Amino acid sequence: MRKSNTNATAQTLYIVIPCYNEEAVIQETAKRLLAKLDKLIQKNQIDKKSRAIFVDDGSRDDTWKLIEALHKKHDLLGGVKLTRNRGHQNALLAGLMFARGNADVVISMDADLQDDINAIDDMLKAYNNGAEIVYGVRSTRAKDSILKRTTAQGFYRLMSRLGVDSIYNHADYRLLSKRALDELASFKEVNLFLRGIIPLLGFNTATVEYKRAERFAGESKYPFRKMLNFAIDGITSFSIKPLRLVASLGLGVSGVSFLIMLYSIVIKFMGSAVEGWTFTIISVWFIGGVQMLSIGIVGEYIGKIYNEVKARPRFIIEKEIH
Ligand code: UDP
Ligand code: MG
């Protein structure tokens, strides 16, 4: 375990913010982060090399231009531009891996100010007390829409039912030490679900609670369809229980078919075998449905393997300003 940093020299902190079409919020976010960094530097809790790094995930609006302008005005703000949109998780990873080369400790957060910036102080405190990973956990989700809240919480419960070690009500607002980042770098998976990977690292961890705010401006970049894909991705990347489910389903249906066989024989000997059209139709559709569902689930995993085997790069960086 790392020794406590309480009396150590100030650390270099990088804050990583993935941004996709965030021109509506980025200036306000930058302003607040800048104030936070300034304050922490003044209090000597972090050193002057600390930065806030905005990762432009192939935005189609003026996000990158704004990042460049911010960088020109303030040394503490920097940016990484990906060549195209790769999705939140890949953009976040790009930022983390970039920060890894420069920082002692990294905090990742969303661009829309839903994550309370003041939790950074508590995260650093926990880090100084020896935590390598600090999870930001939402104490309330009152500001989220009912749809978002219920689906998200249902998802966390399902994940834990399926045996996936994820942190309840934690998204991607977290602190990672350089050591944790170094270990994270050795995870090469293409189907990236950081919320599942980070707990696998182990290490000494802590949690910090914060109130989840409303999106400051602009629209959510996670419509329902994307959220659903993300959830399926998370489950199939970390659990093979759905495959087991298919197997038990097969077993169950076989059991039922045995009973039906006995029933048919009895009917046959009683001399009334022609009846049963309804029963036949239902069986055909039922078995068909079960089979297709099962093939679909198996196919989902094969798709995963397909992507992993090709091992294409998860992101390509076009520019770094820093
Ligand atoms: N994001 C990204 N690439 C994408 C989609 C989203 O980098 O393809 C970023 C987005 O800019 C934001 C974060 O991921 O900083 C979370 O997105 P959002 O706030 O829209 O999601 P929500 O809070 O509604 O779940
Ligand atoms: Mg958001």
Image (tube, rainbow, N blue to C red):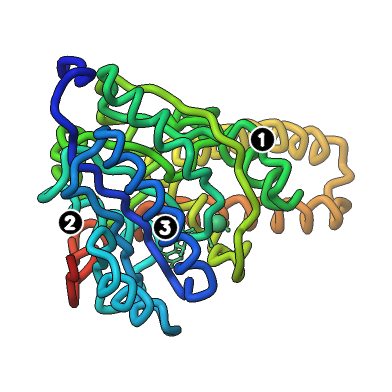
- Give the secondary structure at mark 2: helix
Quarter-of-image position of residue 224:
bottom right
Using the image as rendered, state which of residue 152 and residue 301 is in the foreground: 152
- In the drawing, what numbered circle is on residue 56? none
For ligand 2, the image quadrant comes to bottom right
Disc 1, SS: strand
Write the residue at 26% across / 43% down.
106
Q: Could you say which is closer to the camera, residue 191 or residue 310?
A: 191
- Relative side of 35 to 257, left or right: left
Name the amino acid type tagged 2: Phe
Residue 87 position (above or below residue 35): below
Q: Which callout, 3 or 1, points to the residue nearer the camera?
A: 1
Which one is in front, 143 or 28? 28
Task: Name the residue that disc number 3 marks.
Answer: 299
Going from the N terminus, do you reach mark 3 or mark 2 first? 2
Q: Amino acid at mark 1?
A: Thr
- Rendered location of residue 31, percent (x, y): 44, 60
Q: Secondary structure at mark 3?
A: helix
Residue tagged by mark 2? 98
